[in-house]
Image (cartoon, rainbow, N blue to C red):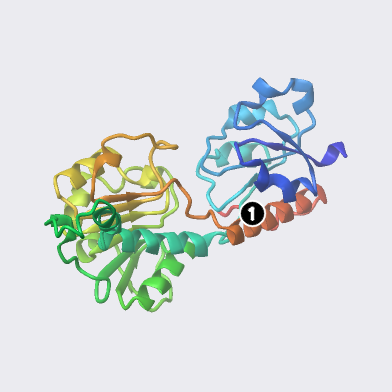
Amino acid sequence: MAADRVLIYSRFPKALMVRIGQHFELIDAAGKPPRDVFSADQLADIRALITAGGQGLGADVMEMLPKLGAIVCYGTGYDGIDLSAAAQRGIAVGNSPAANAAAVADLAMTLMLAATRRLIPADSYVKSGGWASATPSPLMSAPQGLTGARIGIYGMGEIGRKVAARAAAFEMDVAYHSRSRYDLPFAYHATLGGLVDWCDILVIAVRAGPDTQHIIDAPMLKRLGPNGTLINISRGSVIDEQALVAALRDKVIGAAGLDVFEVEPHKPDALTELPNVVLTPHIGGHTAQSHIGMQDCVIANLSAFFAGKPLVYPVKA
């Protein structure tokens, strides 16, 4: 039915859209500007679209879709969407809150363990024959363990809370900084700088936006210190990546684990050549369970919209 046609704005693997396609007629722009793929007539009646929240979606795109009434994010993030432009046009914006929080928190712990216990160098040490030949390696010196380590969590939303719970199970000392203080059994730091000064491991779990752009810069990395570890499962924009490269290279901080980057997909460069960083290709929420949860949220939001009801999971900026 024409009324239930939905534009897939971002580029998604086709397998992720199968369940959604069982409920709605999907037309796929495959990540290209819609006007490059479809005619104005084909776009004229589109009332809803699905997007990856981190991809830019501004007023120019909204103007291509005169009847657009709903932007539904596949995932938690919505930082790429011009919320002001959407509000001016009466376009509802929805997301998939907490659907992938457990998976992202799991990856945060994975990166933390891999970075602090030097898992990648250890793997290489065995595979290269270094262990068998007892070849000395400075990367195999005894690291600090997680028990008793101070973990600072920047951002205490659903993901931050799940990271905190997991860290507590590892017998770590947990504290956090966020815009609001919550009734939680973890210490609260009123400033990000204070949290960074205190912690051994800093986990970035804050929502991206203009106020967090490059907030982890060279001075902040220096405050983390030469034994500090930085983990980012939020958005690459939160960290000044060039400053991070310098900090890792010059041993200003000890190590980093990154699932997100300023430019994605991330091509090999100075960051990828460093032995004290562990990198993954933005797979924090990429588990079978998380995708089912995100699809459920997308289907619920679109079904409510086409039924003339408020979105079930509206973005609360």
- In the rendered image, residue 157, in percent from the top left (x then y), is placed at 47, 63
Residue beneath disc 1: 314
Q: Residues within 10 Å of mark 1 (few under 14, many from 20)?
A: some
Q: Is residue 168 left or right of residue 31?
A: left
Residue 231 vs residue 92, the one in the foreground = 231
Q: Is residue 302 visible?
A: yes
Q: Quadrant of residue 123?
A: bottom left
- In the rendered image, residue 119, in percent from the top left (x then y), is placed at 29, 59
Q: Is residue 184 left or right of residue 299?
A: left
- In the rendered image, residue 60, in percent from the top left (x then y), is placed at 60, 26
Q: Quadrant of residue 99?
A: bottom right
Residue that lies at the very extreme toward the right in this rendered image: 1
Q: Is residue 317 above or below residue 201?
A: above
Q: Quadrant of residue 213?
A: top left
The residue under the point 58% across, 59% down is 290
Q: Is residue 178 visible?
A: no
Residue 120 vs residue 110, the one in the foreground = 120
Q: Is residue 118 left or right of residue 38?
A: left
- In the rendered image, residue 1, in percent from the top left (x then y), is placed at 88, 40
Q: Amino acid at mark 1?
A: Pro
Q: Total label count?
A: 1
Q: Secondary structure at mark 1?
A: loop
